[in-house]
Amino acid sequence: DIQMTQSPSAMSASVGDRVTITCRASQGITSYLAWFQQKPGQVPKRLIYASSNLQSGVPSRFSGSGSGTEFTLTISNLQPEDIATYYCLQHNFYPLTFGGGTKVEIK
Amino acid sequence: QVQLVQSGAEVKKPGASVKVSCKASGYTLTSYDINWVRQATGQGLEWMGWMNPNSGNTGYAQKFQGRITMTGNASISTVYMELSGLTSEDTAVYYCARRTSRVTSIDYWGQGTLVSVSS
């Protein structure tokens, strides 16, 4: 099975900051990596799929990049409503695997 | 609009089984795979398995092999996930989620079903 290592596990940043979250796959997954945002008590929400494709309705300050084994999620201008835990998901082959999550807080 | 509506919360004794349902609307159930994901309180997302409601094919995470079964009834647009041999470690919110393709991955999620296992 493919293991997904996500970092950092938690971070604190100021409003307006640029935030970067990384996911590394234990083997190549081409570009089949999605990012989800989960706010407390809510269902995960897809932000990005296939590495860089922005889900309709998601603010453009969210972007994704990468291929092979290294991927990043960038929030270009952190907003208070972005406080959440973010998860990556490799969707190349079954079994799908999630990263461990990154909790983003505001300083 | 696409919706996945799950059955309500369950409380089970250790050793029991639980069966969670997931009813799809707004699209044809047999068009896409349904995946199941769980989340223990304060923990991350854990993928459990998938089912193709058209073929009935399934695939399960190794961790759950032997005690998980996914089934479906296309006539009522519903899929089921049954987990047996419950322990306190299985206390979690269980989600069904639609996967449209290898490229687009998981898009819609059910609202989640809390399964509590306690003696």
Image (cartoon, coloured by chain):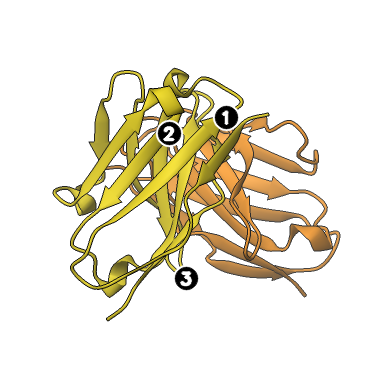
**Up-down relation of residue B77 to residue A43 (above or below):** above
Colour of chain A in the image:
orange
Chain depicted in yellow: B
The x, y position of residue A2, in whole percent, is 31, 43
Q: Looking at the image, is mark 1 or mark 3 nearer the viewer?
A: 1
Query: Residue A60 lies in what quarter of the image?
Result: top right
Q: Secondary structure at mark 3?
A: loop
**Amino acid marked by disc 3:** Thr
Residue nearest the viewer, comparing B100 with B114: B114
Is disc 3 on the same chain as disc 1? yes
Q: Quadrant of the C terminus of chain A?
A: bottom right
Residue extending furthest front?
B76
According to the image, label 3 marks what residue? B41
Q: Secondary structure at mark 2?
A: strand
Q: Are marks 2 and 3 in contact (CB under 8 Å)?
A: no
First in residue order: circle 1 vs circle 3? 1
The x, y position of residue B86, in whole percent, is 23, 65
First in residue order: circle 2 vs circle 3? 3
**Amino acid marked by disc 1:** Ser
According to the image, label 2 marks what residue? B78
Q: Secondary structure at mark 1?
A: strand
**Amino acid marked by disc 2:** Thr
User: Measuring 80% from the left and 59% from the top, which residue is drawn there?
Assistant: A81
Within 10 angstroms of label 1, few (less than 14), some, or many (20 or more) residues?
A: some
Question: Is A84 displayed left or right of B54 in the figure?
Answer: right
Q: Looking at the image, is mark 2 or mark 3 nearer the viewer?
A: 2
